[in-house]
Structure formats: C-alpha cells, structure tokens
Amino acid sequence: MSQRPPQHVWDYSDYARFPDDGNRYEVIDGEVLVTPAPSTYHQHVLANLLVALRLYLKREPMGVVLPDVDLLFVSGQFLRPDLVVVANEARDGITNRGVELPPALVVEVLSPTSSSIDRVKKPRRYGDFGIPEYWVIDPEERLVWVWRFAAGASDAERVTGRLVWHSKGAGQAFEITPEELFEPM
C-alpha cells in the first residue's frame, strides 16, 4: 500500500515569503500555483470592469471593490483574484494583509496560463468557502462564466450578453454589456 508524503500546511508567514518577482503566487489545497504577470488586454478588461463596478457602488453603496488583493479567510488557502467586491457587512475583514472574510463577488480574467486554475480549481474552492458569486471573464471568447453559489448552482452559467449581478443589499442590479467590458484598447 503506497502512502502519500505529508503535505506542507501553509500559514500566512510562509505565503508572505514568496518573492515579489511579478508572478502571482497562490496556495490551493497545499499546492503552490504560480502564474506570470497578466497581458495588457487582460488588464484593460479588468480596468473596464473595475471602473464600472466603482460607479455602480457609488450609486448603490453596498460595498467596496478591490483589485488584486489576497484572500486570507480560510487557513492554509491563499488566493489572489483579479478583483473582489466586499460587502459592507464584511468590511471589518479588510486588513493590511488582504481580505479576511468572504467577499460578495470574486472575479478572474482569464489568461492563457490561468484557465485550468480559474475554471477548474478555484470554482470548487470558492463554493466551499461561501463565496456567493464567482465570475471568470474570457477576453478571447468574449464571454463570462458565472457560478451563482448563493442561488445553489454548482455549475457555471455561460454568459455572452449583458452581465447582471444582483448584489445583496442593493436596490438596483449591476449590469455591463460585452461592448463595455471587452472594449478595444
């Protein structure tokens, strides 16, 4: 009978020692995931969404949007999504280290090197962690994969048209069109 070698249990001090070398380091289920810096178009799509969400949150002050922060709310799991929206009731979970309570929305923009991580590994974990909604934006295909965990979904919905988010505590839903999201540079 073969035995698996003991898996390293990561803590924040281990995670904080990763180099500041332009790569993105994450730890999921004991596995270290390293992806290179994103492309310029990836960043452009992310900026389009960030601006739209900031304007929305000014009208519907139910939370705050933060790009590129560490999620540290589950011991040994260190994720760094492209963008999160933290609801007002979880704002005390925003620290200098990152976000230490589950955010209302987590968003990733796909890169060629992150597809299997963002579309396979992360959704399962985010569902387990109590994230209400998770989006994976695919700039190449001009579509968004949406996991609505709060609504009981375990599979992704493929959205090619208007993207709508019904955030808890907001009077109006957030909406963005593909033309706004995937605007050329």
Image (cartoon, grey):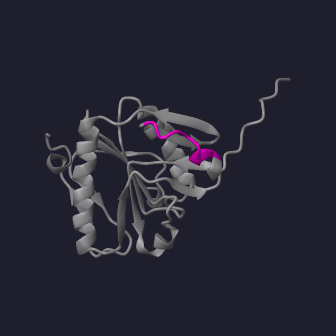
Kindly identify the residue that appears in the image at 72 percent across and 39 percent down. Answer: 8
Q: Residue at x 21, y 52 (%)?
A: 162
- Point 62% across, 52% down: residue: 12
Magenta stretch: includes residue 58: no
Residue furthest toward the right?
1
> With 72 as the anchor, is 144 left or right in this view?
left
Can residue 172 be seen by looking at this rendering? no
Q: Where's residue 18, x and y in %? A: 56, 40
Is 174 situated above or below 92? Answer: above
* Quadrant showing the C terminus: top left
Give the x, y percent position of residue 135: 37, 49
Q: Who's the residue at 25% across and 53% down the image?
A: 49
Residue 115 lies in quadrant: top left
Horizontally, residue 109 falls left or right of residue 55, namely: right
**Where, quadrant-wise, is the N terminus in this rendering?**
top right
When asked about the image quadrant of residue 63, the answer is bottom left
Choose top left, top right, bottom left or bottom right for residue 53.
Answer: bottom left
The span picked out in magenta is: 14-21
